[in-house]
Amino acid sequence: MGVVVGPRVIDAGASLLSVLISPVAVAAGYPSPAQDYFDGRIDLNEHLIKDVTSTYVVRVSGDSMEGAGISDGDELIVNRALEPVDGSVVVAVLDGELTIKRLRITGVGVVLQAENPAYPDIRVPSLSDLVVWGVATRCLHVV
Amino acid sequence: MSKPAVMRHMPQTAHVDVNCFYASAERAFDPSLEGRPVIVLSNNDGCAVTRSPEAKALGIAMGEPWFKLAPRAKQWGLVALSSNYELYGDISARVMELLGRYSAWLEVYSIDEAFLGVKGTPDELLALGRDMKATVRGNVGVPVCVIIAPTKTLAKLANKWAKNNPGFDGVCHWDSVPAADRESLMRRLSVIEIWGVATRLTKRLNALGIHSILDLSRADPVMIRDRFSVVMMRTVLELQGTPCIPMEEERIGRDQLIFSRSFATPITTAAGIRQVMSVYGQQASARLAKHGLQAKVLTAFAGTSHFNPKDTSYPSVRVPLPMPTADPVILTKAAHALLPRICEGIRYARAGIMVTDLRPSGNQAPLALFENPHEERHVGALLEDITRRYGRGSIGLGHGGIRGGPDWTMKRDMLSPRYTTHWDELPLVKAA
């Protein structure tokens, strides 16, 4: 419930620095053999964020998306630049609130589905009647 | 438009600005604010500095004090918010980064506006403007207005007009606007409204029969230079469509950093001001270090409220630093030079420091003999690291380090979450 991942897990500044500055101390005359192979540490930003200008992190409140592996308190990475398609997990504006749903685009209309049988589907006449705030791309879940 | 072929590919200037920036940034994360009157208040929740169109329609004026509006807010359904600088700063950076992808030639003019160099046929430029508008709105989430004109002055001039004219739908290509419409706009606007023309000059212009912007655009540039200045001549040329004001791409180097706030409750003692100066000295140090800069000059100042015309006091002191530095101890000590000028008992409403004459650190390494001892021990970096880990105010030098002490920090009672900069304030999405 509402577990907060510390801000230091994803550190935007660290990755750049670690590329610029070799982690291996260089003593004159004894270059480390590993140095030539070091291209920087694994960078979570690079992995999780395709475009920094359009990506936001939001927090999930509620259990209606449990079936999609998205739990109460999880953080979602949302990219506003992505085109929502059938099957996308989207953040949509419903009654003035940011709401997370599975988007279904079918021949007969558009449906916002919960991934929990306790919550009913919401039918929308067409995609243009819906304000999609962004498309969720990743879920950060504490295990 | 039939234009000579050579004219079509002249470089043009795009002026892009976010509509009602602060209010729009708030709406991007709280859709319930859409369609409602929203105002954002200045420091200390003083007065309205941003008004949504709905708030303007209620007759709320720019700068109207909150205490006057508060009693009627409920009846109006008015939403008032404190300035969420963390949010606005991040949204601004996103907008600017995105705009930078459209042109190698970007000048960030203020937190919510920028100039870009663009090229193309009128149709291409209009398409480019529409794409910028749609992409900033879609990707970042805020609405912008784009004006593309031959010069910066014309682009800026047309901004308000294009914004208030729904026919443009937020994108205007100046040269494609019928000449009669352009002239009628320039005839309607007084020279006062032009970018860069000071009020005192308008009287002298009026004496020459120059009243409207159209009059000025038809003046002889050489006569204007002789009677006024080169600056004014450039304005005339720019109005005539000749670019004269170059893009400023990078301001760091001769820029300045200012740390200044109004106090929630006035400070009446030198000891109180001393504490303020200590905090700003450390903030300036941290910011300089972050940008890899050192300052040569520090200016410290304080002032009484404009609303309190008696007992005014505006002490200020300029301290040349012994060597370029970002050292918190030296900066704080320099800022304390203001203290002897503080009159005990006077109600100071604001204070601040400014560091100027900035240069990249490590450009010319001083001889070890002259290197100051605190810098060597990395006091600044240590303070910054602890602050980052344990929060602002957890550690500090001298008087700046007193936790819970300062009661002068900014009042922000109606602050929205800092959605994009703090893990514990992320926007909530409902899964229900």
Image: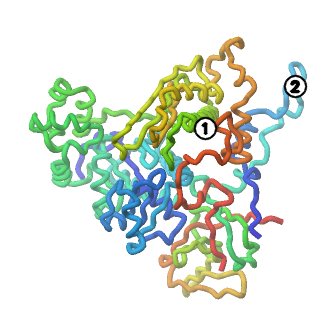
Question: Is residue B378 shown left or right of residue B68?
Answer: right
The chain holding disc 1 is: B
* Callout 1 amino acid: Val
Task: Tell me if I can see residue B398 in this picture.
Answer: yes
Q: Where is residue B60 in the image (x, y as percent from the top left)?
A: 33, 62
The answer to the question of whether label 1 and label 2 lie on touching residues, with beta carbons closer than 8 A, is no
Q: Position of residue A34 (x, y in %)?
A: 88, 34
Taking the spot 15% from the left edge, 31% from the top edge, the residue there is: B220
Provide the residue designation for mark 1.
B279
Query: Are labels 1 and 2 on one chain?
Result: no
Q: Crowding at label 2, few (<14), some or many (≥20) Cα neighbours within 10 Å?
A: few
Residue at the spot 57% in from the left edge and 25% down from the top edge: B334
Viewer-proximal residue among B169 and B67: B67
Left or right of B75, for residue B358: right
Query: Which disc, if any, is residue A66?
Result: none
Q: Give the residue at x 51% y 33%.
A: B353
Number of residues whose C-alpha sits closer than 10 Å to that of mark 1, classed few (under 14), some (14–19) or many (20 or more) = many
Name the front one of labels 1 and 2.
1
| Residue B287 quadrant | top right
Q: In this view, does A42 lie to the left or right of B186?
A: right
Name the residue nearer the viewer: B89 or A31: B89
Amino acid type, callout 2? Pro
- Please tell me whether mark 1 sits on a helix, a strand or a loop: helix
Give the SS element for disc 2: loop
Disc number placed over residue A31 in the picture, else none: 2
Residue in front for this viewpoint, B83 or B137: B83
Picture quadrant of residue B240: top left
| Residue B284 in view | no
Distance from disc 1 to disc 2, alpha carbons, whole Å, reads 44 Å
Chain letter behind tag 2: A
